[in-house]
Image (cartoon, grey):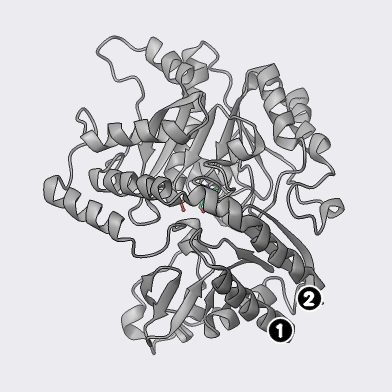
Amino acid sequence: MSQATPRSNEPLIHHWMPFTPNRQFLEAPRMLARAEGVHYWNSAGEKLLDGISGLYTTPAGHGRREIREAVAKQMEELDFAPPFQFGVPGSFRLAHELTRILPAPLSRVFFAGSGSEAVETALKIAINYHRARGQGQRQRLIGRARGYHGVNFAGWSVGGMVKNREAFGLGLPGVAHLRHTHIPENRHVIGQGPHGGLDLADDLQRLIDLHGADTIAACIVEPIAGSTGILVPPVDYLQRLRSICDKYGILLIFDEVICGFGRTGHPFAAQAFGVTPDIMTMAKAITNGNIPMAAVAVREEIQQAIFDVAGPDAIEFFHGYTYSAHPVACAAALATLKLYRDEDLFARAAAMAPGFLARIADLAHLPCVIDTRGYGLLGAADLAPGASPGARGFAVMRRCFDQGLVLRVTGDTVIFSPMFITSEDQLDAMFTILRRVLETI
Ligand SMILES: Cc1ncc(COP(=O)(O)O)c(C=O)c1O
């Protein structure tokens, strides 16, 4: 039976909320009205701890004056300029700044407005690259089960989350998936699991054997799968993917929309794991979540191959967004990168990680917790399912909110991704609330 949309919250019904049970939300809206540092305040003025850095977006803390002032100044100076055929100084500065923290071969940067747009851009670059080199038959894209690459058509097609796929038809043709890397042998391992890395990565070889390497354009993975519950790659997994891609001329894409900008204690997960992709997507923390922005970084030769086949005055890449390199977003990103640098925030994340991960590991002692895992400042605990799949996770999220903690759940998995400025006392307070809820759920 269909559930009626409650009418009691009449003024709220017009906003169709994303990834939210809208009807349930209207019964008891969770409104976040103000934020500063590691805290939110709800509309009743009650203070809550932010355990997930916005949505992995805001590691430097909410309400940063430096970003706010840079944004205000930019809006006074130049609010908007067309990104096609014209440039704004900030975007060139930003691309250059990014190359200072990216792994060295990634030296050309294309801007977009969201992680989903960055993924679409990356996949289109991959296909265009092969076509430019006379290998237009390379059109297949390889994703991974339990991957999340945003919600646009190519992104959900290479993604591996059934609920994001089943309502929307067939998706992109020519997509195949690796198995995910969450295997029982690595249960309760914090960091990289010792089991399964080579075998799971060899799924790519199996798909090559099935489809033919020269039909495959790219393989896209999140170095650590974030949205489906912090799936850390087993030992040797990413290295093996890299070597298979190298052997067969397949582009390796890392989707670092969550992992990027210090979350692993390194600028990017590529550096944390010592594996460099050919293309990398990033978003979220690029502006500390203050203004929507995303980017795709590629090796120079990928850009060059696409440039080489275009006439001297021709547009080389028929792709772009009205809000690519928006000047205000560029100003926010430049101020954010400066904050990361000035406050040495990636090193702070690295220093915080062992204590944080020990707290995650400690959740394993609770009877309802069936797996714990984490890396850097990403941690997760799987709960034994309750009455129906996801019901217990949802109840935990709601009770934590009522007790002053914002965290994220996916199904029956609880996810933590604290800000890099979180103090030990604040971490303790977050875990105290979560433990209290888990002990009574
Ligand atoms: C790995 C990854 N890729 C892509 C996206 C999509 O980003 P957006 O929601 O900004 O479109 C996300 C969002 O969480 C993500 O985690």
300 vs 56: above or below? above
As drawn, 7 above or below 115? below
Q: Label 1: which residue?
A: 441
Depth check: 295 or 210 in front?
295
Badge 1 marks a residue whose secondary structure is loop
**Residue 85: quadrant of the picture:** top left
- On the image, the x and y values in percent for residue 58 come to 44, 58
Q: Residue at x 40, y 44 (%)?
A: 294
Residue denoted by label 2: 368
Rendering coords of residue 358 (x, y %): 72, 63
Three-letter code, disc 1: Ile
Which residue is at the far left?
76
Q: Is residue 374 left or right of residue 14?
A: right
| Residue 240 placement, left or right of 220 | right
The N terminus sits in image quarter: bottom right
Q: CA distance from mark 1 to mark 2?
A: 8 Å
Q: Are marks 1 and 2 in contact (CB under 8 Å)?
A: yes
Is 245 on the left-hand or right-hand side of 164?
Answer: right
- Number of numbered tags placed on the structure image: 2
